Image: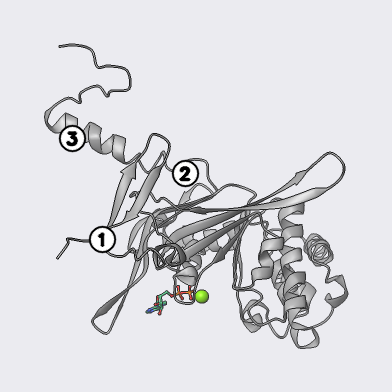
Amino acid sequence: MTAPAAGQREPRPAGLAGLRAEAAAAAPSAAEYGAGAMIACDQVVRIYAVGGTDIQALQGLDLLVAEGELTAIVGASGSGKSTLMNILAGLDVPTAGSVRVAGRDLAALGARERIAYRREVVGFVWQETSRNLLPRLTAAQNVMMPVSGASRTARARRARDLLGLLGVAHVGERRPDGMSGGEQQRTAIAVALANRPAVLLADEPTGELDSATAADVFAALRAVNIELGVTILVVTHDPAVSCYVSRTVEIRDGRTSAETWRQVTADGRGNTTRHATEYAVLDRAGRLQLPREMTEPLGMRDLVRLDPEPDHIGIWPEPGPSP
Ligand code: ADP
Ligand code: MG
């Protein structure tokens, strides 16, 4: 047998061992995928069975988020954003696939560990301001409530510090009905951070706010991301979020479909420029979602032809069999 030429692959061993080697090469093990990431969603599926029909809310969603990232999740209504957030919050479990957050495999958590996870590892902020705060307590009391294992003085100090960091120190002694919507949501972020979670999840936290107030909430999220280093995922419809995050992930039909990365570069004379680059997501199963704006003008549907080139892949509309 001659040695394979450069660039050619070693022939694989035959039989079962060969098949295993092939499978391992095609799909790296779950342990490798996302090892070290703060959030690692690996082919997550969530199917709701409703009156005899299955609704596939998540259809094999992959997502990696590094520690300390501030990431926005966008997508049309019904695309699966809240389903994902509920799973990450430990309130729901996937039908298939694996989810790891801060080193914990969420499927493997027992009932008690799940409660501890929700209390200590993740904090969440919901769209409905009324769902985030206890109406009878002041802002400071709301923040002190979840803090465990500390003296009253230490909890009060924590509340003061967090409300200060979020720019709402002035509402400390007020109850939610005496605050504006934006003040309530910024207080809600303080509550969510009270126990020093590794991850903060916010599902449309500005959905009930006007745009100026929404910008304050995004700025507050960015401030705690920078000051505390907490990893943040924020679901939003608000395009203004792009000024505050360096990464936006788009979910379409229950999968991550595209990402935008923003970078600020300086030219040495003090001028800074923001660059945005949009990428399509190539998921772990090799699937790629092509934007309709690109496929429709070219009449691409059902089947396309792939043309591999040394440095790229061409995608051509398939004219179909001639009549
Ligand atoms: P988004 O937050 O992006 O608007 P959701 O995650 O709420 O989307 O919903 C995704 C899909 O799953 C939708 O089709 C929705 O109707 C469905 N869905 C969400 N929650 C449930 C549920 N508890 N029971 C049945 N279907 C649900
Ligand atoms: Mg939602």
The residue lying at 63 percent from left, 79 percent from top is: 207
Q: Give the left or right position of residue 120, taking residue 107 as reference.
A: right
The C terminus lies in quadrant: bottom left
Q: CA distance from mark 1 to mark 3?
A: 36 Å
Circle 1: residue type: Pro
Q: Quadrant of residue 25?
A: top left
Mark 1 lies on residue:
319
Instruction: List the residue tagged with mark 2.
Output: 34
**Labels 1 & 3 near each other (Cβ < 8 A):** no
Q: Secondary structure at mark 3?
A: helix
Residue 72, image x, y percentages:
60, 62
Identify the residue at horizontal 79%, vertical 63% (top origin). 162
User: For residue 19, which numbered disc appears in the image?
Assistant: 3
Query: Which amino acid is tagged 3?
Result: Leu
| Secondary element at image label 1 | loop
Secondary structure under the numbered disc 2 in the rendered image: loop
Disc ID at residue 9: none
